[in-house]
Amino acid sequence: MKTQYTDVVAEYLREVDLRLAGLPVLQRRELLADLAAHIETERVERHLRGEAELIEVLERLGSPEVVARAAYAEAGPLPPIAAPPLPPPTVARSRDRAPWVLPVIGAGVVAFLVMLVLCAGFFLASSRQSAPQQVAPEATVAPAAPTPSFADPTN
Amino acid sequence: MSDVGQLATSLRRGTLEFCVLAMVEHEDRYGTEIVRRFGDEPGLAASEGTIYPLLSRLRRVGWLDSKWAESPSGPPRRYYGLTAAGRAALEHFRTEWVSFRQTVDRLVGTGEAA
């Protein structure tokens, strides 16, 4: 008779356990231990005899689906973090890389800009010396004679 | 009927845990004792098995602590007691609940005057 009790109870607990795969292992074991203790307490303290009375205890506990659903609901945001073991490392890696890489790129950009400014300054400084010679001919060439002669025929 | 059940579920959410805290406010109680007590209360009677995940969460957030103790009559019992943080949370809920209840009563027309 006692093996009949434990058969029903063991089956119930196994059905609950099967539905808790997404929970952290300690929460899973805790719940199963709590349920097992509850069932055994009810059996002993209420002097239950026979499988039917034990099944009533299990029915009051709720179906394995209902109990498991409550377990997930109370576990809160833990399962999504704990359940997929693969995504977190990649996320963590890209997070690790970001603070590392961005300053390096930033430093490179800043260094490039500094170089650019220095070069520009150098060119400006050097072109300023040769500017009078180069600009002067262009300025004299620009208001070239042909323009007035173009205007004259149209008028 | 499912709407009624849904309403009960919605109302339980956010309040049931404080009923649990209040239940162990003055003395530690073991799991089956807490579950039986809820079974005696109409309207709070969710499936008994859903109380244990709730107890687990309240312990994890530090509002309850628990310890296993031998029972004179049966298997070891897991006793739950209120922590200082749990006591503070319960007091906070009491304040919030009174003003919440008064607001709902006024808006829905369920106050004593209505």
Image: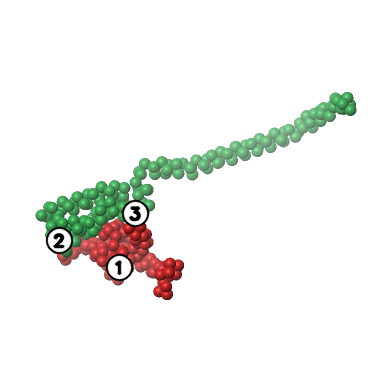
Chain colours: A green, B red
Residue B22: image quadrant is: bottom left
The disc at residue A101 is none
Labelled pair 1, 2 in contact (Cβ < 8 Å)? no
Name the residue carrying label 2: A48
Neighbourhood count class around disc 2 (C-alpha, 10 Å): few under 14, some 14–19, many 20 upward: some
Callout 1 secondary element: helix
At 12% from the left edge and 55% from the top edge, which residue is drawn? A2
Report the Cα–Cα distance between label 3 and label 1.
Answer: 22 Å
Q: Residue at x 39, y 44 (%)?
A: A88
Q: Depth check: give the residue in front, B106 or A138.
A: B106
Residue at label 1? B23
Examine the rendering and report whether any part of residue B79 can be seen: no
Quarter of the N terminus of chain B within the rendering: bottom left
Q: Is residue A58 visible?
A: yes
Q: Is A68 left or right of B71, judged from the image as shown?
A: right
Labels 3 and 2 positioned on one and the same chain: yes
Element assignment for label 2: loop
Q: Are marks 3 and 1 on the same chain?
A: no
Return the chain for callout 2. Answer: A
> Count the marks: how many?
3
Position of B95 with respect to B72 (left or right) is: right
Kindly check if marks 3 and 2 are in contact, taking CB atoms under 8 A apart as contact: no
Label 3 to label 2: alpha-carbon separation: 32 Å
Residue at the image position 28 percent from the left and 53 percent from the top: A66
